Amino acid sequence: MEKHHKSRRQFLQHSALSGVAMMTSLPILASELTKNKVSTLSSSMLKPGGEFSNYGTPSPYEKEVIRWISANSDVPGNGVSWTPLHELQGTITPNGLHYERHHNGVPDINPDTHNVVIDGLVDKPLNFSIHHLLRYPQHSRICFIECGGNSNENYKTSPSQASAGYAHGLVSNAEWTGVPLALLLNEAGIQSSAKWVIAEGADAGALNVSIPIDKLLDDGLLALYQNGERLRPENGYPVRLIVPGWEGIVNVKWLRQLKLSASPAMTRDETSQYTDLQPDGKAQQFSFEMQVKSLITSPSVGMTLPDNPGTYQVTGLAWSGIGKISRVEVSADGGQTWQDALLQEPILDKAFTRFSIAWQWHGQYAILQSRATDESGQIQPTREVLIANRGKYSYYHYNAIISWEVDELGDIHHVYA
């Protein structure tokens, strides 16, 4: 019981975030600035600033905030780039930092000649140009997209020491704007035997996947814009399919065809890929929904706590393909005790939720963890429970609790706990 009380005292109550504990430990007092004669005009105030630009770019002082690219050297154009989640705040991922997964490079597509066809089991096959799609009512939706292979390094026996975003950053969150797919499917006339939609992209790999039609009628979107601007080529320009909460592979980029069918096509990327091998040797197919998950982004592996003692904001992201995040708990003792974190508004359906809690570090050994719960009641599992259910040969859909070890010097490493 005493151990529990000590653990709880490591976390400050939300009302204390602007209180004495924070005010006396973080800022430099104005009197100190005056005494050290630092209150003189800065150099930026002594000359005119730079000129306007046609398209804004990040500050040169933030040049290290980039995606980390890991490509398959044997197959050019086949690889991934991770979102640097550990370098970001808020919940919206900038367009230039959204994660990527390419199977055969980024195609160069002229929107004036590109079309999206809806055919198969429909009454009236339709062929939409991009200009046609831009004339339809536009709908915006904030949601995350996560690759089914995100965090798969954690299935290995030794934990990766890559930065948080470079191990778990095959997930991003953005506002997508476009045409609700239900409008277009209903316009084509859905035949009663149509249960699936085969979506195909216009990339060199002609990636295609099967999606239940009910999901696309519910909240599927043909996105033309990302965070208010036209899609970028690496994220599907000129049109991308958005399937909120479902694994990244079904959010087909460079969309060219939606073929309605009575059954799935059993394509390469839904048979040999993106399936979950079970302990009994069978493979579970169509694991569409991304399960509840969270990640502490700061402090995290590779970072150092410079002050001893000191107050730190433990912050991170939580998401679920099932619905809204209802709770995130944080532990500093490897999951022995937990404290509720503050959830940042707005809390949206199938979207990132930012959480934070103030932690008082006294120079002690600690293991930081976060555990998310969604509105359906699903709770993020431990690694031990996940592997027991999935088996040791799994590769996709890793959503277990992630642990950061803080040693007595303030250095942080990734551990399994």
Image (cartoon, rainbow, N blue to C red):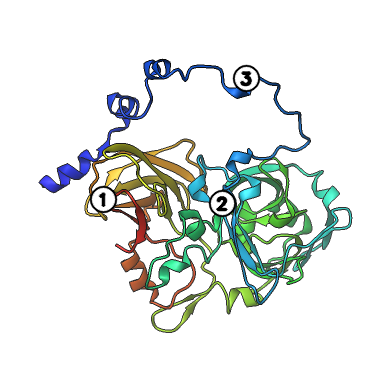
* Residue 233 quadrant: bottom right
> Which badge, 3 or 1, is on the more N-terminal residue?
3
Point out the tag, 1 or 2, that comes first from the N-terminus.
2
Residue 93 place in picture, x, y as percent: 58, 46
In the picture of the structure, the residue carrying the numbered disc 1 is 408
Q: Is mark 1 on a helix, strand or loop?
A: loop
- Residue depicted at x 21% and y 41%: 8
Under mark 1, the amino acid is: Glu
Residue 149, horizontal then vertical, whole percent: 52, 66
Cβ–Cβ under 8 Å for marks 3 and 2 = no
- On the picture, is 333 further left or further right than 149? left
**Structural crowding at the residue carrying mark 3, measured as other residues with C-alpha within 10 Å and reported as few (<14), some (14–19) or many (≥20):** few
In 3D space, how far apart are the residues under numbered discs 3 and 1 (Cα atoms)?
A: 42 Å
Give me the residue at 39% from left, 16% from top: 35
User: Which residue is under mark 2?
Assistant: 172
Residue extending farthest to the bottom is 281
Q: Which residue is drawn at 68% across and 21% down?
A: 47
Q: In this view, does 169 lie above or below 51?
A: below
The kind of residue tagged 2 is: Ser
The CA distance from mark 3 to mark 2 is 37 Å
Q: What element carries label 3?
A: helix
Would residue 230 be visible to someone looking at this image? yes
User: Label 3 sits on what residue type?
Assistant: Met
Which is in the foreground here, disc 3 or disc 2?
Answer: 3
Q: Mark 3 points at which residue?
A: 45
- Left or right of 410, for residue 264: right
Labelled disc at residue 315? none
Bin the neighbour count of mark 1 within 10 Å (Cα to Cα): few under 14, some 14-19, many 20 and up: some
Mark 3 or mark 2, earlier in chain = 3
How far across and down, in percent of the image, does residue 285 sit? 53, 74
Secondary structure under tag 2 reads strand
Disc 1 vs disc 2: which is toward the camera? 1
